[in-house]
Image (cartoon, coloured by chain):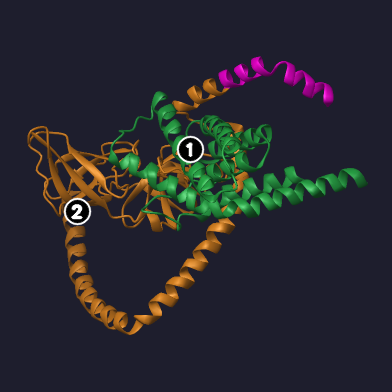
Amino acid sequence: MKRVLDMILRWKVPLIILLVIIMVGTIHYTSTSRLKISLFEGLGRDLLVPFQWVFSRAQRFVLHQVEKVQTLRTLKERNAELEELVLSLQAEVLELRNYKRENEWLREALDFKNERGHDLLVAEVIGRSPSNWESTIILNKGFAHGVEQGMAVVTNEGVVGTVVSVSRFSSTVLLIIDAQSATGGLVQSTGDLVLVEGGQADRETLSARPLSRDTVVEVGDVIVTSGLSTIYPKNIPIGEVVAVEPRQHNLSFAAVVRPFVDFNRLEYVLIVLPQDNGES
Amino acid sequence: MRYLVYGLVLLLTLVLQTAGVPGIVFFGFKPQLLLLVSLLAAMILPPVEAVVFGFCAGLAQDLVVGRFITLHAGVFVLVALVEGLVIQRFYGENFIVRFGSLSLGTALAQVLYLLAAASFGLSRSWDLGTWWAILAVSLFNGFLGTPLYRPLARLNRRLLYYDELLKRTG
């Protein structure tokens, strides 16, 4: 042992240089898009999954208890509000049922092809990126459950992000609010195409840039996925336009989009599996 | 025995950081716990051990949630070295020195990370939002780390004592 230590001390400078070269090489190699993560990364992530799962569960339990105590105070008012809401929702449901029937009839009439064609896999959020420069979450489903890199992740509220790396029992999802994220979107009211990007300074909103000069976006417009990419299915809600900012001498603009998904309170998400994957 | 405890501290911090701290935010920013324990290790441990601890903490972060493997490891090593030098030159027992060095160490680590990440393709505009984020996280780490120094230093002294005791008694 002492001989090894002596040797390390004698060859200190060349060893440090070698280590720096290896580190720079590794950073360079991992900076490009990879189809598979390394064995060490997979092992590290899988080993941490049970700890993260226990910890996130415990944290969620505590937060729910605190929330419960807080809501007890306003329970009476909230109850009255909710009763009112139930009545209005019941009326809305009746109206929507009528629309649904009408829609089904129209689809049949037009021989409309069902484009959904996807299975969904429920996954639990067990971790988040500790970095303030990256917006990623860790899910408790990996390639053992059929998850693959590039799959879309959504909730019933809207788009969450894309799976960027997968280990056996966990996967990492790049959120749409991340600076590296860009998604094809569609203005629901006009059908105009926009590019929805993350990386906003507040890390809570998105930026939507028009893809053509004639695109019109107004505050209150809903942006949905365009379905032009292979990642996201069509018509999944992304967010609502809250502001439109002019750019380049008023020749262009960028719309500020507030996502429908609350990324700070994500607990469960849905991974969109291709239909073939579910059948095989 | 103390290396086992250092490993457990690292594991606990990693789990806390990735699963436990989304609820702890300061002006919308999360504390950098792994960086914080590396800086505290640089203040408490001898230089070589502090550098190895920083490397392991950075590598753990890279392997579990990082985008560039060994980038955090390199940054943590550099910052641990600088932190160790600063603490040697100033009176580390003073809480203002501790707060300042932890905050500055965090700021330095973030600037180094962003510069290095930019050179490997993860570019980011150096606007007011970025500087605000660096400032917020640095202050957050300073406030969190300053009261943690004494208990951790005491724990380290105790571990050294037990290690010595084990060595002498066999």
Question: What x and y, as percent, mark residue B164?
Answer: 84, 45
Viewer-side residue, A152 vs A263: A263
Question: What x and y, as percent, mark residue A186?
Answer: 19, 43
Q: Which chain is orange?
A: A
Viewer-side residue, A235 vs B2: B2
Q: Which chain is green?
A: B
Kind of residue at disc 1 = Ser
Horizontal side of residue A9 vs A192, given as left or right: right
Q: Earlier in the sequence, mark 1 or mark 2?
A: 2
Magenta span has A3? Answer: yes
Say which mark, if any, is on residue A165.
Answer: 1
Name the residue beneath numbered marker 2.
A107
Question: What x and y, as percent, mark residue B96?
Answer: 50, 48
Kind of residue at disc 2 = Arg
Q: Are marks 1 and 2 in contact (CB under 8 Å)?
A: no
Decide: is B45 above or below B13: above
